[in-house]
Amino acid sequence: MQNYEEYLRFQHNSAVFYFFCIIFAAQMKKTIYDKYDKQKIGGLPRVLFEGRIVVILTEAEARKAVDYLLAQPILGVDTETRPSFTKGRLNKVALLQVSSHEVCFLFRLNQLGISPSVKRLLEDTTVPKIGLSWHDDLMMLHKAGDFQPGSFIDLQHHVREIGVEDLSLQKLYANFFGQRISKRERLTNWEADILKEKQKQYAATDAWACIMLYEELMRLEQTGDYELIKTTDDVQADTVA
């Protein structure tokens, strides 16, 4: 009889433990929003790329950088253009930033142009390159030189698959990671003779963040480990930045 009572007690405790495991797992699901409130971003901790940043000025440097990049499993990409404050005038793309998990290369296209190595990178079909609103970036890059686009993935297409309507990198990163990407350097002079450290950090963070978002998005799609919260229509409209 004592053994039977111990068995029942064990079964009861196991059931209770299993129940609480289910509750805990449900509580651990990531909460994401279809529209993230931009007003909340300012209070989030800032995130920065903490890896190595390398500025590329010559074709010789570009060749070595591209050799490294095309040996990586995944890349994040973005571009920067010197802002124009004259109506109807649009400057050419000045910077192409391409990041792995550990290293980000800043190709100064205003000096380098679409060199043979840069073209090889842009036309590569073996390594997935993750960007945001990348169609617009490709249009700007085509104005700098001729190339056939290789393997690129636009985050904006994929976030919609799980019900997220945000378009900007800043809002997406805040939504998925609860961290803030600063946009203070966006309207600075990207054609300056020497880029400031803050510009380099900004550019690298944007490219690297694309990798982080894509990998997290793939994880959530595969596991279903998230809860999508529908917000009201009064959340601020999104813009691409």
Image (spheres, helix red, strand yellow):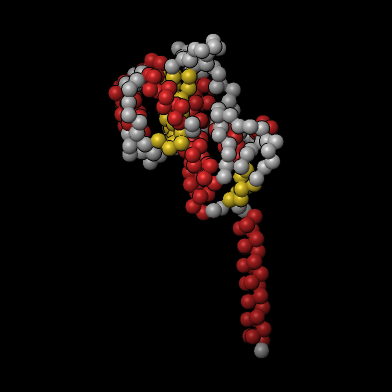
Q: Is residue 9 above or below residue 167?
A: below
Q: In this view, does 115 lie to the left or right of 184?
A: left
Which residue lies at the image location 32% right of the left edge and 26% below the top edge?
147
Q: Is residue 62 left or right of residue 220?
A: left
- Please provide percent x and percent y for residue 227: 61, 50
The N terminus, quarter of image? bottom right
- Please provide percent x and percent y for residue 126: 33, 39
Q: In this view, does 73 lie above or below 10?
A: above
Q: How many labels does the image show?
A: 0
Q: Is residue 21 visible?
A: yes
Which residue lies at the image location 64% right of the left edge and 38% below the top edge?
36
Q: Can residue 55 be seen in this view?
A: no
The C terminus, quarter of image? top right
Which residue lies at the image location 40% right of the left edge and 23% below the top edge?
141
Which residue lies at the image location 44% right of the left edge and 19% below the top edge?
93
- Please provide percent x and percent y for residue 186: 55, 22
Q: Which residue lies furthest to the bottom in this view?
A: 1
Residue sitting nearer the eye, 140 or 185 = 140
- Please provide percent x and percent y for residue 211: 47, 38
